Image: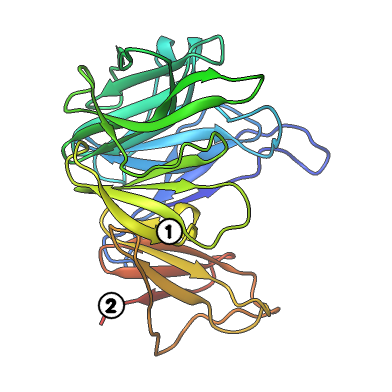
């Protein structure tokens, strides 16, 4: 999928109607004619991510350009069965009355994660089609306080990532017990612990889904080169993946099954490095040959995406593209 969007304001800061055009390709070489996506709004808003569920694709619109005020909330939704024809969906009243920050998609369905209107109480909703959403109960803990950081969908169901907070001592931070919760349908939750997880209150967890596999990484505070990680294929049984590079938390692009990281050379000139990332967080630098997309001061830069045929690199101005095909 490729989206082209007009600026949300002119050079004087006046808001302009937002125009978005969409095109799709199954191979990265042949693209459908661009179609205009209905917006009906103006200003600094745009489509920033797409997730896939049982009914097709769901595009998520967010504000952009504002760096203050905490996580942005989902502003608009579009649905598509084929990536060519897009329909803007009415925002559910539950979303406008609360704060939906992320939506994850997978074979099990869509799960939205955010907070209630108070801005602090966690909340989740599930949907099979991105149109009708059901508010779901949170996991119940026997003691302490539930703290949630993320929600993901994968082949077998839904997983919530977070911790149980105990009381703090002598004015210090609360004791933290990291954990995950699994549910096949988003209703009844079962807790699973991460063996050997740090109880440091300043360490934070991240989770990534790759179809039938989940990867959780815990990032300790400070300047680190490795971080503990765990994998699971069912959301309940978690195995240590050892110490992996923390770069896999932020860097990989994925099509839901494959993931790679692309890093430009430090000098700003030359060939970007491409690193493959497997479902366990292990990485390997991929050898490249052929007509490679080189970085230089004369090139405006590239946008990258992973698809069914390989790695697509498109120049920022749309003037040229390259397709890296696995050997």
Q: Quadrant of the C terminus?
A: bottom left
Residue 278 coordinates in the image, percent (x, y): 30, 63
Is residue 306 visible in the rendered image? The answer is yes
Pointer 2 local density, CA inside 10 Å: few below 14, some 14–19, many at least 20: few
C-alpha gap between disc 2 and disc 1: 17 Å
Image position of 52 (left or right of 97): left
Q: Secondary structure at mark 1?
A: loop
- Quadrant of residue 284 in the image? bottom left
Residue 152, placed above or below residue 25: above
Marker disc for residue 326: 2
Image position of 157 (left or right of 263): left
Marker disc for residue 252: 1
Marker disc for residue 183: none
- Residue at 31%, 70% (x, y): give it: 310
Residue 252, placed above or below residue 192: below
- Quadrant of residue 275 in the image? bottom left
């Amino acid at each position: 999928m490729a989206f082209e969007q007009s600026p949300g304001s002119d050079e004087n800061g006046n808001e302009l109607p937002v125009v978005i055009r969409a095109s799709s390709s199954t191979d990265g070489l042949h693209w459908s004619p661009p179609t205009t996506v209905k917006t009906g709004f103006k200003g600094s808003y745009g489509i920033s991510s797409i997730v896939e569920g049982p009914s097709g694709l769901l595009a998520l619109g967010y504000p952009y350009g504002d760096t203050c005020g905490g996580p942005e909330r989902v502003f608009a939704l579009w649905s598509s069965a084929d990536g060519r024809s897009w329909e803007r969906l009415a925002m559910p009243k539950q979303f406008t009355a609360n704060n939906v920050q992320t939506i994850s998609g997978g074979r099990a369905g869509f799960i939205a994660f955010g907070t209630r209107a108070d801005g602090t109480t966690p909340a989740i909703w599930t949907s099979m089609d991105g149109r009708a959403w059901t508010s779901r109960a949170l996991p119940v803990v026997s003691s302490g306080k539930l703290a949630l950081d993320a929600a993901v969908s994968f082949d077998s169901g839904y997983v919530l990532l977070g911790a149980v907070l105990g009381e703090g001592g002598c004015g210090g931070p609360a004791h933290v017990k990291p954990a995950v919760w699994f549910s096949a349908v988003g209703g009844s939750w079962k807790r699973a612990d991460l063996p050997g997880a740090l109880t440091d209150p300043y360490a934070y967890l991240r989770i990534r889904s790759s179809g039938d596999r989940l990867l959780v990484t815990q990032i300790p505070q400070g300047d680190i080169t490795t971080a503990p990680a765990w994998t699971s294929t069912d959301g309940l049984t978690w195995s240590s993946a050892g110490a992996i590079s923390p770069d896999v938390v932020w860097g990989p692009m994925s099509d839901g099954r494959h993931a790679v990281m692309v890093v430009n050379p430090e000098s700003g000139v030359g060939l970007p490095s491409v690193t493959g990332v497997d479902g366990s967080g292990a990485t390997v630098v991929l050898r490249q040959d052929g007509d490679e997309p080189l970085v230089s001061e004369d090139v405006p830069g590239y946008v990258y995406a992973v698809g069914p045929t390989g790695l697509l690199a498109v120049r920022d101005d749309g003037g040229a593209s390259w397709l890296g095909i696995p050997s």
